[in-house]
Image: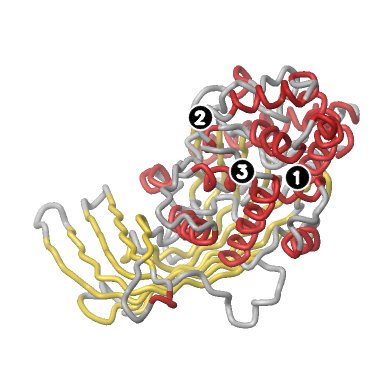
Amino acid sequence: MMLAPTGTPGGCRAGLMLCLLLAWALFPAFVCGAATPADLAVEAQNPSPASAIEIDAGYRFDLGPGAASESFSRVSYFGELVRSTGTPFKYAHGIDLLAPAVPTGAGDRNRLALRFEKGTATIGGSLLAAEGVQPLALRGLEKLQLRGTAWAAGDPENGSLQYAVGLESPPARIPGMAHSQASNWIVLGVNAQRQESDAATTTISGSELLTYRSFLGKAFGWRKSADVGKTAAEIAGVFLSQAPTYAQAQDLAGKIESTPANSRTQLQQVFLDTVTEAESEGNWTATVRAMALGHADAITDQPTVSVYAESSGWYTFAGDPQGRKLKNLITATVDYWLLPTRDDVFLRVRYENGYDRALPTERRNQLLVSVALRY
Amino acid sequence: MARLTKRERRVNRKHVLDALKAETGSLGGDAAAARVQAYVKDPVGANTVEFAYVGGLVLQRFYIDPEKPNSSERRSLWQNLVARLGKPEAVDPGGWDGTTTVGMLQAMVEEA
């Protein structure tokens, strides 16, 4: 067990809670682990098509001098329960291709919540989030493809607020990594920032910053989380049962298209792709089977371990730097999917060292060990 | 909006994969890299299984971190996409993240 024991009664309670959470999380996985190959096809999912509940629970080892370690947990709920609505792959029986996707709040979830939750503010992956990025065509500098950025952050504990506007480069490859198979990028920027701090006295200050953020990561140990052939047969069966002919498929596609693209399920979009790809009645059945096979092959790919590091920082070249002129935050994370047929349960070990731009006077030096669940 | 042709959709999928490569430097991980590379070289001639395979790749495979793409990375990717598809004024409808597939993102850009 990687979760650390704690010496205090409160710590013991927290540790017990984490163990219970872990047991609760792993129970269905063990049940699925005893399932037949046919069941595994139904379980195929990568990642979970819609996560209605997300749980992170773990322990934070604070490595700074005199700092206290503590457990943390976060439970987030998004939209309706998945089970009641029926999402593709996870509960593949009875899929209705006309049923709308479950609203999950995808895209913008977590960002603000993470900032304001006690004990969990440090496990988010969003560093130096630059809101409102827009392309800017500056005369003579068009080839640089610069983007305008706007950023804001607040700390409710001391009532401080920071906001900044600036320019940012498009992502470039990290030197020496251009031809590697690893994901990698670096973004450079320049910002003008204002700080309103201390709610009691409301002091306002300004500063100019050079910023950077970079990322390097790679997934290893790719394997299949389910039987590709059986998963493909499941998908093809759904398509052909609800649209046995090309004419019926076109009719069904017309109805699906009335749902905006960002609200469709994966299967609905694959169905639309299949209709365009088939082009005629004679190709319909063969195209359905080929599309189902390709899609099943993609969604059953599952890494065993992901290793990634992120660094972001800023250099204050004018104004009050609130300490050192150059500050940065480095994080290194290992995610481990420990169960062969579940991609929604993973262990995470994460090390963080440095300063978050939203909290520029508080240095972090900590190790986090957690179990993450995505249902 | 008129439905796009098979050829147009295949070429647009290549643009999405190219944009992801430009943003992340990745071809979707070791398990997918060779197939993505082959598709991008000849999107029109690729067989249907490959068209579906590259369309089924989720963005998380390119961004690695389950919390990514974050808001700035999504906006950067969107700018890259609309530039490649010749729709610079297209507005991001939102509602997508690392669990979104290449095919779903392609449809959002085509529809925007």
Q: Quadrant of residue A280?
A: top right
Q: Label 2 vs label 1: CA separation? A: 25 Å
Q: Label 3 vs label 2: CA separation? A: 27 Å
Q: Chain of mark 3?
A: B
Q: Nearer the viewer, mark 3 or mark 2?
A: 3
Which numbered disc covers residue B52?
1
Q: Residues within 10 Å of mark 1 (few under 14, many from 20)?
A: many
Q: Tell me where residue A201 appears, x and y as whole percent.
A: 9, 57
Q: Label 3 vs label 1: CA separation? A: 16 Å
Which numbered disc covers residue B4?
3
Quadrant location of the C terminus of chain A in the rendered image: top right
User: Which residue type carries mark 1?
Assistant: Ala
Q: Residues within 10 Å of mark 3 (few under 14, many from 20)?
A: few
Which one is in front, A267 or A200? A267
Question: Image check: A272 left or right of A232?
Answer: left
Which one is in front, B72 or A2? B72
Q: Under tag 1, what secondary structure?
A: helix
Q: Under tag 3, what secondary structure?
A: loop
Q: Tell me where residue B79 appears, x and y as whole percent.
A: 46, 59
Marks 3, 1 in one chain:
yes
Question: Image check: B20 left or right of A78?
Answer: right
Q: Is residue A117 above or below residue A210?
A: above
Q: Is residue A38 above or below residue B99?
A: above
